[in-house]
Structures are given as structure tokens and as C-alpha cells.
Image (cartoon, rainbow, N blue to C red):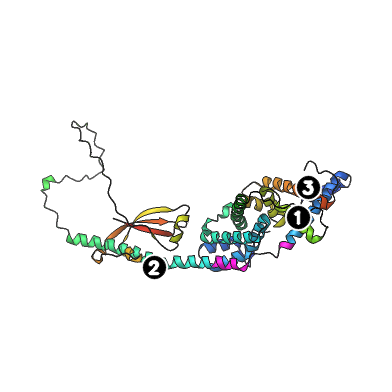
């Protein structure tokens, strides 16, 4: 994902600036540019399409209300939007845990027939079963193809933290998916 | 991913353990990429765009509709101040004649500060200040004021507004006092938008 997506000849940062000045067309362009990525991020983090739609809606309602909250010196427009989405997703996950604390994301069925569709489903479920801070690193860097610096800005942490969480998250995924992979040796030191 | 580095690949050629680990990492990268590719067509349902665009346009329309009222109020206050100044200058009685000897000479140059003189007589203690009694209306919500309980960092400012502001929120106004300003407390949200007002006497 590029740090500053260009809509035609206008960057997302410029769209935010125009939107803050009341330009509805700029707001619409910004929405169409970023809504899918925000939705996918929320979907991968929550596992719920409804929650992902709610988060996406609330991100842009908040941006539309408080567009002047974006500070270019702090990061890109993408990092700003994903930062808002992250806070909303974490609140949603906390509420979901509070309402149903005993429910857990089902572990992938590692003995299922190895098909592409089932592999993809198994990987998705494995990602959902990761602890949140590892999950968001994997989702942003591996599934949304953000670079480390942009992910760090969205997560509000250092680049080194993103790298270490990503490394640990990938190691945990390999452990969960090992039988499907057919790995027979221990993965130590990861 | 780091798995693609040439150095790791060269090492894996001579180390079976690392070769297996590299193969696992590449496999994981591949399946994650497949998940990402499959998800690329996913996006928020159309209703989300409708909701956010409607909210944005309503907010902009509300801001524009209040501009004429506050602009008129500010203009009326400026006119009221001018008229009050002119009216006061015309209606005040002439100052009483003062004997010339009683008028102290105005200093022609900045004077040095006078030396302090110890007071021989103690001043009587000042009476304690009595708090001024004020009467205020309830807060009247302005556009989007129904969201008032959800304000996170509201600010309230005491202002003097033209008396026509009472009309703008549906309150009666004494026309004979139309030129007199009125005191009001105005609540602003984080955007600097007025959310509620109450009038104070």
C-alpha cells in the first residue's frame, strides 16, 4: 500500500485538507479511496462483516466530524485512518470479550482435506486466533501490504516493535498451521 | 518477506534445518498472499457510503445555515456599540465647571514614581465581596446540540451578544431594549462549533 494514494492527481492528504474545509466531493473521493482497506482490516481483525461495516462507517463519520484532527507531521492519511480504525476495532473486541468471555475463535481444523479454499479459511481462522497485537501486525503488513513505517504510525509504536510482533505472529501462525504444512521438525528459536 | 533474501537462500543450500525453516516461511508468505488476494474484492456495503455522506452534508448545511445568524448578530453588536457611544455623547449632561486651581497640572514628561509614604492611618478593612446573583435560562441546544451529552471536550465562554440573539433561538425580546447587548454562556465543541446557549441576567 502506498503511503499516499493519489486519486487522479490529488493525494489523500490533500483530500483530507479539502474535506476539513467543507468539500463534500473531496470527502467522497477519500471515502472511495480508503473504505475497502479499512473494511478489510476490520474484517480480518474481528472476523465479522457486520462489525467491519460498523467500524468503517464510524471511521468516516469521525473523520467527517473532526477532519481537522489530521496532522500531516504525524504521518500519512492512511496511518491516520487506520489509527482511528484500530481504536474502534479494539473497543469492539473488548466489548465482544466482555459480552461473551468464554467464546473463543475456533482453532483451524488441521485434519481437514487440504484444498485451496480450506487452506485460505484455515489461515484466516489462524490469524483470528492470534493475540490482538500480533494479529494487527500480520493483518496490516501481510494482508494489507503496508510497509513497516506506515504500520508503525497506524499502531502508534516503533518500527522495531512492528517487526518483532510480525515475526512472532508469523511464528505462531506456522505453529498453528504446521500439520497442514506437513512440517515434522520443531521450529525452535522463532 | 525476509525469506526472499539471497543470503538466506545461499545458507539454506548448505543447512537442511534452515532450508526447512525457509521453506516454511515461504509457504506461509504464499498462503497469506492468497488470503490477501482473495480479500481484495471485499469492501464496505453501499449503505455505509450513504450514511457517511449524508452525515457530512447535513453537518456542512447546518454550519452554513447558522453563519447568517451569527454574522448578523456580530454586525448588530458592532452597530449597537457605535450607536451607544454616539447616543451617550449626545445625551450626557455637560460636566460641571471646576475651578482652575483645583485641576492638577498634567505632567509634561513621564514622572519618576513617587516615593512611597508610610500611611499613618490604617484603612478600614474592605467588606467581603458578595457574590453577584445571576439568573440564567436553561441551555438551549443549537444544531447538533442534541448530541450535547456526548461532547468530549466542550468549552463554555461568556459572551455579550446583540439582544436579537434571543429571537434567533425562539425567546422573546424587549424591542425597546433592542440595542442593548445581552450576556450569554455559549458551549462550543472541539471543532469550535456552537452547540448550546443560555442567557444570563
Quarter assignment of residue B48: bottom right
Residues behind callouts 2 and 1 on a single chain: no
Q: Is residue B94 above or below residue A166?
A: below
Left or right, B107 with respect to B67, comes to left
Give the residue pinned by disc 1.
A123
Give the residue pinned by disc 3.
A175
Left or right, A42 with respect to B190, comes to right
Q: Is residue A84 found inside the magenta-colored segment of the image?
A: no
Could you classify mark 3 by the number of other residues whose Cα lies within 10 Å: few (under 14), some (14-19), or many (20 or more)? some
Give me the C-alpha separation between circle 3 and circle 2.
Answer: 65 Å
Residues behind callouts 1 and 3 on a single chain: yes
Q: Nearer the viewer, mark 2 or mark 1?
A: 1
Q: Which residues are magenta?
A: B38-53
Query: What label does residue A170 carry, if any?
Result: none
Q: Secondary structure at mark 3?
A: helix
Q: Is residue B39 found inside the magenta-colored segment of the image?
A: yes
Q: Chain of mark 3?
A: A
Quarter assignment of residue B159: bottom left
Q: Is residue B43 visible?
A: yes
**Could you tell me residue B121's position as x and y percent?**
18, 32
Q: Is residue B162 above or below residue A162?
A: below
Q: Secondary structure at mark 2?
A: helix
Q: Residue at x 78, y 49 (%)?
A: A174
Count of numbered circles on the image: 3
Could you classify mark 1 by the number of other residues whose Cα lies within 10 Å: few (under 14), some (14-19), or many (20 or more)? many
User: A43 or B57, which is in the foreground?
Assistant: A43
Q: Residue at x 41, y 66 (%)?
A: B67
User: B179 or A174, which is in the foreground?
Assistant: A174
Give the residue pinned by disc 2.
B68
Amino acid at each position: 500500500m502506498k503511503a499516499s494514494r493519489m486519486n487522479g492527481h490529488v493525494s489523500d492528504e490533500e483530500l483530507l485538507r479539502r474535506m476539513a474545509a467543507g468539500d463534500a466531493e473531496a470527502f467522497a473521493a477519500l471515502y472511495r479511496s480508503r473504505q475497502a482497506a479499512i473494511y478489510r482490516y476490520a474484517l480480518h481483525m474481528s472476523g465479522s462483516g457486520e462489525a467491519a461495516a460498523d467500524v468503517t462507517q464510524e471511521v468516516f463519520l469521525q473523520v467527517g466530524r473532526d477532519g481537522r484532527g489530521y496532522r500531516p507531521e504525524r504521518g500519512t492519511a492512511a496511518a491516520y485512518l487506520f489509527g482511528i480504525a484500530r481504536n474502534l476495532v479494539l473497543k469492539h473486541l473488548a466489548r465482544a470479550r466482555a459480552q461473551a468471555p468464554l467464546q473463543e475463535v475456533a482453532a483451524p481444523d488441521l485434519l481437514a482435506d487440504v484444498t485451496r479454499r480450506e487452506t485460505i479459511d484455515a489461515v484466516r481462522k489462524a490469524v483470528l486466533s492470534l493475540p490482538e497485537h500480533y494479529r494487527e501486525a500480520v493483518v496490516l503488513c501481510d494482508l494489507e501490504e503496508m510497509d513497516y513505517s506506515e504500520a508503525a504510525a497506524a499502531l502508534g509504536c516503533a518500527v522495531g516493535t512492528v517487526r518483532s510482533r510480525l515475526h512472532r505472529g508469523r511464528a505462531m501462525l506456522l505453529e498453528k498451521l504446521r500439520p497442514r504444512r506437513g512440517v515434522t521438525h520443531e521450529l525452535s528459536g522463532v | 518477506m525476509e525469506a526472499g533474501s539471497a543470503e538466506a537462500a545461499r545458507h539454506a543450500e548448505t543447512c537442511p534445518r534452515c532450508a526447512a525453516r525457509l521453506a516454511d516461511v515461504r509457504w506461509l508468505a504464499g498462503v497469506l498472499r492468497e488470503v490477501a488476494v482473495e480479500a481484495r474484492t471485499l469492501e464496505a456495503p453501499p449503505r455505509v457510503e450513504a450514511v457517511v455522506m449524508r452525515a457530512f452534508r447535513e453537518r456542512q448545511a447546518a454550519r452554513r445555515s447558522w453563519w447568517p445568524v451569527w454574522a448578523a448578530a456580530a454586525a448588530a453588536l458592532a452597530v449597537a456599540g457605535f450607536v451607544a457611544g454616539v447616543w451617550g455623547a449626545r445625551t450626557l449632561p455637560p460636566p460641571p465647571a471646576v475651578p482652575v486651581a483645583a485641576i492638577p497640572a498634567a505632567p509634561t514628561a513621564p514622572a519618576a514614581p513617587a516615593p512611597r509614604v508610610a500611611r499613618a492611618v490604617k484603612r478600614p478593612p474592605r467588606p467581603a465581596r458578595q457574590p453577584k446573583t445571576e439568573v440564567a435560562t436553561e441551555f438551549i441546544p443549537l444544531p447538533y446540540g442534541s448530541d450535547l451529552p456526548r461532547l468530549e471536550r466542550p468549552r463554555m465562554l461568556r459572551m455579550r451578544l446583540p439582544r436579537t440573539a434571543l429571537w434567533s433561538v425562539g425567546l422573546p425580546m424587549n424591542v425597546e431594549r433592542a440595542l442593548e447587548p445581552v450576556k450569554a454562556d455559549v458551549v462550543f465543541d472541539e471543532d469550535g462549533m456552537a452547540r448550546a446557549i443560555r442567557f444570563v441576567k
